């Protein structure tokens, strides 16, 4: 704001000077021209023509004085564009990366260690986790335990320091990012929406998607109802990061977007955390059917949403401390049973 105020100050001092010089030129020409006319050295017509030409070059000259300003703004903007273009991604694709064939959905973490920025303490410690095709695996644990980090590793947003992650026996580092991520649907904890129409926000993961497909996905995610109430329906522009929508509405768009690809592997990171109990229940019901033949990694703090998972993995400071089904974990009266008793006091 201060820089802007300074700009306005300078400009308001500078602009009148330019105008003044301009008009001064007019006065001088008028005075000198009139003198020449009186002396009969010039005709009135010549003077008038001269003044008219002067008026014509007036505007362009004025504009020229603003060019430096515009150029400088442009240069700054360009710098930012290049900064973005030059950003090195966290992970690099191998030159001989292969296209990941259509996966069944077997996912394995083998002795995985991970730390952000290759420094500090490990966020994930010696993680071993095998997910069979079609399984729904839930990750639970305290805030900061490393749940989102595991999802990030599975989507190869980062590479482990140690160990490997396998999709149907293919190391994720050996396959192209496009073929890997093209087979997964991700609803991230922070909903990422773009300032575009609802239709584009749902459909952008799948090139050539039809309106019907978008509507079907929106219906499963229980987004169709609220979309139809918006002024332009599916063509409504939702603002930067979807700011014109509520948190729950944004989540439902993110779910629709993840489903539209018909992914073999689905990651739901707190995907229904901003929804009211009823919408959450309805979406859970719809998802249950959809998840039957897919591998799914669900992260949720509300334990009611993951009770039916095939396997529940309890994390503490990047380590697995318990695994099992809901009833198995309740039976051993460990950490999960404790968390459960907090949420459902008897
Ligand atoms: N981009 C990052 N850079 C550095 N450290 C990070 C980054 N993201 C997360 N961390 C750290 O890694 C640890 C695990 O974070 P993570 O996001 O996986 O937790 P979480 O289990 O998903 O928690 P929550 O339930 O709050 O979402 C935390 O201690 C956090 O501070
Ligand atoms: Mg998280």
Image (cartoon, rainbow, N blue to C red):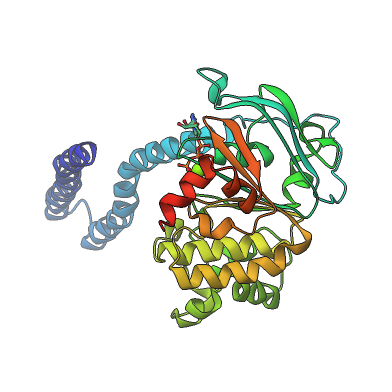
Viewer-side residue, 18 vs 145: 145
Location of residue 344 with respect to 333 vertically, above or below:
below
Coordinates of residue 150 in the picture (x, y in percent): 62, 38
Viewer-side residue, 280 vs 102: 280
Q: Residue at x 66, y 76 (%)?
A: 216
The quadrant in which the C terminus is found is bottom left
The quadrant in which the N terminus is found is top left
Coordinates of residue 229 in the picture (x, y in percent): 45, 82
Viewer-side residue, 316 vs 122: 316
* Residue 73 appears in the rendering: yes
Coordinates of residue 214 in the picture (x, y in percent): 65, 72
Question: How many callouts does the rendering have?
Answer: 0
Lateral position of residue 233 relative to residue 108, left or right: left
* Residue 196 appears in the rendering: no
Lateral position of residue 172 relative to residue 280, left or right: right
Viewer-side residue, 60 vs 284: 284
Q: Residue at x 61, y 38 (%)?
A: 322
Coordinates of residue 135 in the picture (x, y in percent): 74, 53
Location of residue 256 with respect to 317 vertically, above or below:
below
Q: Residue at x 86, y 30 (%)?
A: 96
């Amino acid at each position: 704001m201060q820089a802007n105020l300074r700009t306005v100050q300078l400009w308001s001092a500078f602009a009148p000077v330019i105008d003044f010089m301009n008009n001064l030129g007019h006065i001088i020409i008028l005075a000198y021209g009139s003198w020449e006319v009186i002396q009969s050295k010039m005709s009135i017509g010549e003077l008038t023509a001269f003044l008219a030409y002067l008026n014509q070059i007036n505007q362009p000259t004025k504009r020229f004085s603003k060019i430096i300003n515009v150029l400088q703004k442009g240069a700054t903007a360009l710098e930012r564009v290049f900064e973005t273009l030059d950003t090195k991604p966290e992970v690099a694709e191998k030159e001989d990366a292969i296209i990941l064939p259509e996966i069944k959905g077997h996912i394995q973490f083998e002795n995985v260690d991970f730390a952000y920025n290759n420094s500090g303490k490990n966020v994930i410690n010696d993680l071993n986790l095998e997910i069979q095709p079609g399984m729904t695996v839930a990750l639970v644990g305290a805030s900061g335990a490393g749940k989102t980090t595991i999802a990030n590793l599975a989507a190869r947003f980062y590479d482990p320091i140690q160990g490997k992650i396998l999709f149907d026996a293919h190391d994720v580092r050996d396959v192209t990012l496009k073929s890997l991520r093209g087979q997964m649907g991700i609803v991230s904890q922070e909903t990422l929406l773009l300032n575009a129409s609802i239709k584009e926000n749902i459909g952008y993961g799948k090139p050539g998607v039809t309106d019907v497909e978008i509507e079907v996905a929106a219906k499963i995610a229980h987004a169709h109802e609220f979309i139809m109430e918006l002024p332009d329906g599916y063509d409504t522009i939702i603002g930067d990061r979807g700011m014109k929508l509520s948190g729950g509405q944004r989540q439902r768009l993110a779910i629709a977007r993840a489903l539209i690809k018909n992914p073999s592997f689905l990651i739901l990171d707190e995907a229904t955390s901003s929804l009211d109990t009823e919408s959450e229940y309805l979406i859970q019901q719809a998802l249950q059917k959809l998840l039957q033949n897919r591998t799914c990694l669900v992260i949720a703090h509300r334990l009611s949403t993951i009770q039916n998972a095939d396997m529940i993995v309890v994390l503490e400071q990047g380590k697995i401390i318990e695994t099992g089904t809901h009833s198995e974990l309740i039976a051993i009266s460990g950490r999960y049973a404790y968390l459960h008793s907090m949420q459902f006091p008897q």
